Image (cartoon, coloured by chain):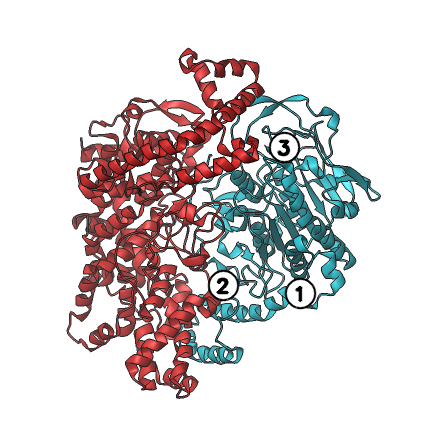
Amino acid sequence: MRLSKLSILILLAAGAAAWAAGSREKLWSLKPVVRPEIPSAFSNEKNPIDAFVRKRQQEKGLKSVGPAEKATLLRRLYLDLTGLPPSVPEAKAFLQDNSPDAYEKVVDRLLASEQHGVRYARHWLDVLRYADVDGGMPSDVGLYHWRDWMISALNRDLPYDRFVRAQIAGDVSGEADEIFATGFLARGAQSMEDKEQDLAFNAVETVSLAFAGMTVGCARCHDHMFDPISQRDFYSMKALFDPLVLDKKTLATAGQIFAYARAKDQYEKQKAILEAPLNELTAPYKKRLLEERITMLPPDVQAIIRKTEKERSPEERKIADDYAPVLRIDTKKILEVLSPEERARHAELLKTVQALKEPPELPVFWAVREDSKKIEAKNHILLVGDPEKPGAEVTPGFPFSPAKVDFGAGRRQTFVNWLTDPENPLFARVAVNRLWQWHFGEGLVATANDFGYVGDKPSNPELLDWLASEFIARKYSMKEMHRLIVTSEAYKTASIGPADLMESNSKIDPRNLYLTRFHLERLEAEVIHDLIYSVSGELDPTVGGMSFRDGPEQKWTGGDKVIGDYDTRTNRRGIYMGRGYHGDADLLPAFLQTFDAEDGRRTCPRRNQTVTAPQALALMNSPMVVEHANQFAARLRKQSAGNLAGAVELGYLTALSRPPSPKERDAALSYIRQDPKRLDGFAWMLLNLDEFVYQQ
Amino acid sequence: MNNPFPCGRIARRKFLFEAGLGFFGTAMGYLWSQEREGVRLPGNAPAKTVIFLFMCGGVSHIDTFDPKDNKLAGKMIEAVGFGDNMAKMVRPVIPCQRKFTPYGKSGIPVSDWFPHVGSVIDNIAVVRSMFCHETAHSPAVIEMATGHRDRFADHPTLGAWVSYALGTANQNLPTFVHMGRPSSTTQLNGGYLGATYSATPFRAGDTPIDNLVPPKGVSRAERDEQMKTLMELNREFRQRYTIDSEVSARLKSYQLAARMQMEAPGVVDLSGEPKHVLDLYGIGQGETDAFGRQLLLARRLTEKGVRFIQVCHAGGGNGAWDAHSDMASHEPLCRQVDKPIAGLISDLKQRGMLDNTLVVFASEFGRTPWSQNTKGRDHNPRGFTSWLAGGGVKPGIVHGATDDVGYHAVEKRQYISDLQATILHQMGIDHTKMTFAVNKRPIKLVEEGFGPIKEILI
């Protein structure tokens, strides 16, 4: 059952009232989105965004620095919408196209490009904490299908409400592809049994941060200190996800599955034959060691262990389970007590067993499903988040919900209906703010994951609300919002202007909240990576599939063991560079780490932009950069056919999407000294330029 | 495992320039700006540098620095465990095969596995009453490194906190250096403080730091010329963006990288060290060579003003010190570290550096008095030994004690955070006031325990 709008309004009002008690003021982000009028004084602006921006600027006594140059704008747009630079012919064509809709044509083409989904999926994967490996996360095998799903969903402009719905309840949506969206939930479990209930905990925390801009994690242990989220709210919401368990999906045709079953059966039978003499050899020792172990235990425990399973009471069964690991006799222990001759024979027998090849496993994907027993089970507050310390009972619910919600449509479905409802003031606001941030470098609310009391207030609340209402009016089409935003004059503003204007603006607005200029942004690690591979001509832009390993940087122990299958093509886009966390292995590639990418353990609403000496060293000296600089130079040599001035021109157009200034051309040519070999050094310089790693 | 601080990250992007750009750390640490709030302890800090020696896997205190009477061998005691399993059982105490000798004026007994450390024991304060909570390697290493038990919260490691608090004393070298293979990447991690405070891994070799030198085929002169032209080509952009501090920071980062290229190779070049010094560390003497080189490099980095030098021994997997099946596996490990450690302490002392260099010897836990039906010992978080030398620590004393068999710390119990609090204290930091706000909630390195171990401080 879908909640009625009225009931949503009531519950929001009730929720807001409840929080207001004891809070300093009513939280802005919970007030309904009311579509603001477009400021009439600025109604001649073609794009309503500009009317709101100009109004703010005028109120503050600020003045825009004016539009960016064409070449700058083109590079900005390409890096923003696809994460790749324009090719030289594309750049030239745009610079020569004087038609009034020249820019809009490029916008449409880029939004239609499949690389757009790759670029924006990377943003979302940061927020939704994608990692190829995370300690013992069982869903790591095949998790990349979630990434593939996301890219495909963004490319076909799946409406945002459905994008969210699929990731929260794709297993029950009835859409075949959406099972892959539930990788988002499956990723939360840290072990197959999920005893710690990480799946549900992670779901509550990430869903709240990502789609509602609410930090609820504090309420895991106590009522939120700042925001109106109680511990009861937290565990009610957790009850929505408590019934979920991991669900293994085999990705194969029926024929492949039958063939596998046959091969596996043959293998098992063969193996049993080969293992028989091995077991015969070890059985007496195993028995002896087990007996020794049992005698170590306290007498009452011994008595329990010596009973058969049937003879044990339920309490005794639990005790027996507790001691099972203690009583496990592994082969290593048995080998210690064998005689040298027996050990040799053991090794020989083992060799024949190991020589038998197990049929390769069929590809799998870990989704989630609701476990019928768990649906029946009661849900509890867990003291300090410990599954072994259940407190008061809770019923399914969510923060700000009325006392009784009809969960007849299913727990998560009912929740998603509420979450994605246009009347929910957080849902659209949080989303458009993210989109804005990804275009401008900073959101209208700078704390994209936190719309609570601790978070920042919007710099332009009317604009935020107009965008939110527009998003709803446009049926949550993300591509339409992208188009709307990047075609605004605000987006097309230069990142620099006359010194006196810049100075007077920055006195009033030092953080450039009101966008009198475009933020200068250090590019993200993956974009820098892709730029380097693009200019050298080495990038494989294929979309989809497994991650690749970034060479020997992923080192220390167990690399292969913990990483599993990896793509052997290492020249793919940065989004496919494997990453993650493991206690025993360094799994975040050095390049990503150096340029502030995260390992995917936690949601990252916004990347850091540090400037460090290791970054300088990486661009100066890493074998990857030097190799690609040389390939870039080889490309320039080939394409310019001995015309070195032409090579310099082409180098600038390729790397920076603009021709060199006369001074730059002269400096470069004087370095090259008529020697085509020295284009290697020139290409290296281009990759080390400030301008190369910044978006202006 | 519970997550006490899951409240999200702070907005720390662009943090570096706001804090005043430094090299791998900020030039002026947090303490300078926080002085008024009393984070910095009054007076001069005794320790300028910490050399933190971490033995991966768990050193048996019973076989090294905490002798027990073998008369109790065979006694049945209540035991908890086999590894991660917390079942209760009754186990016999196994005899210790080591011989202990009282050393020096202090007469502190040290086993025959550490004769060289024994010879410098008069410089050392042995804390025999350490305990922690975690019983498995990875969580215990994280607990030891961060003072917290949850990996999800991304808590920074001790060295990162020290860089954060104190900044660098040498603009050309990192503030926090790591050597050796760690047990966990957490031991290098700046966590929510930021990657700026993470450890820089150093190797004793030609390229101590990743990407320090250009690949083969680029000559020095050529690179110099390239850098000169690069400056010219950057000029227009930099003039245009004088208003953006990150652009000027980027220029500085290249200058710092260049200075680092000048200084770092000299630091790791041990060829100028006289033979008697190399001998002292066991360099060129087989199994002591590798660790000896790392510790000599640690001394050289100390001379250059590096704040925190962490050296991990036998890391990877559970760590080689994890002697479940046979205590004899400790023997070669002890030989690898004994002479170099004693060499380091003697060398620092001879140079007058020991007074302001704090050397710490630790592992994630100790080992049990009973075995798992083997000749080895299980993990023991309930009682173990760490020791400290120099940096204002009382020389030649023993602090605290375990029970008769070495299972539980019973006298003057010290939680692992007390070790961290002691280190901070000696570096002039008030552990109760050094905080970092994650979502406006202040988080500390030391949240639990009894504070600095005042009894072992001068």
The label on residue B440 is: none
Residue at the spot of label 3? B375
Give the residue at x 49% y 67%: A617
Q: Which chain is cyan?
A: B
User: Hey, what amino acid is under mark 2?
Assistant: Pro
The label on residue B270 is: 1
User: Hey, what amino acid is under mark 1?
Assistant: Leu
Q: Residue furthest right?
A: B105
Q: Nearer the viewer, residue A198 or A111?
A: A198
Looking at the rendered structure, whether the residues under marks 2 and 3 are on a common chain is answered as: no
Residue B4, image x and y in percent?
47, 37
Q: Is residue B349 left or right of residue A347?
A: right
Q: Is residue A688 visible?
A: yes
- Number of labels in the image equals 3
Give me the chain letter of mark 2.
Answer: A
Q: What colour do you see for chain A?
A: red
Q: Is residue A48 visible?
A: no
Q: Is residue B55 left or right of residue A570?
A: right
Mark 1 is surrounded, within 10 Å at the Cα level, by few (under 14), some (14 to 19) or many (20 or more) other residues, namely some
User: Hey, what amino acid is under mark 3?
Assistant: Lys
Residue A148, image x and y in percent?
26, 50
Mark 2 is surrounded, within 10 Å at the Cα level, by few (under 14), some (14 to 19) or many (20 or more) other residues, namely many
Cα separation between marks 3 and 1: 40 Å
Residue A62, image x and y in percent?
34, 65
Residue at the spot of label 2? A614
Looking at the rendered structure, whether the residues under marks 1 and 2 are on a common chain is answered as: no
Say which of marks 2 and 3 sits in front: 3
Image quadrant occupied by the N terminus of chain A: top left
Give the residue at x 60% y 51%: B162
Task: Determine whether the residue tagged by mark 3 lies in a helix, strand or loop.
Answer: loop
Say which of marks 3 and 1 sits in front: 3
- 2 and 3 marks in contact (CB < 8 Å): no
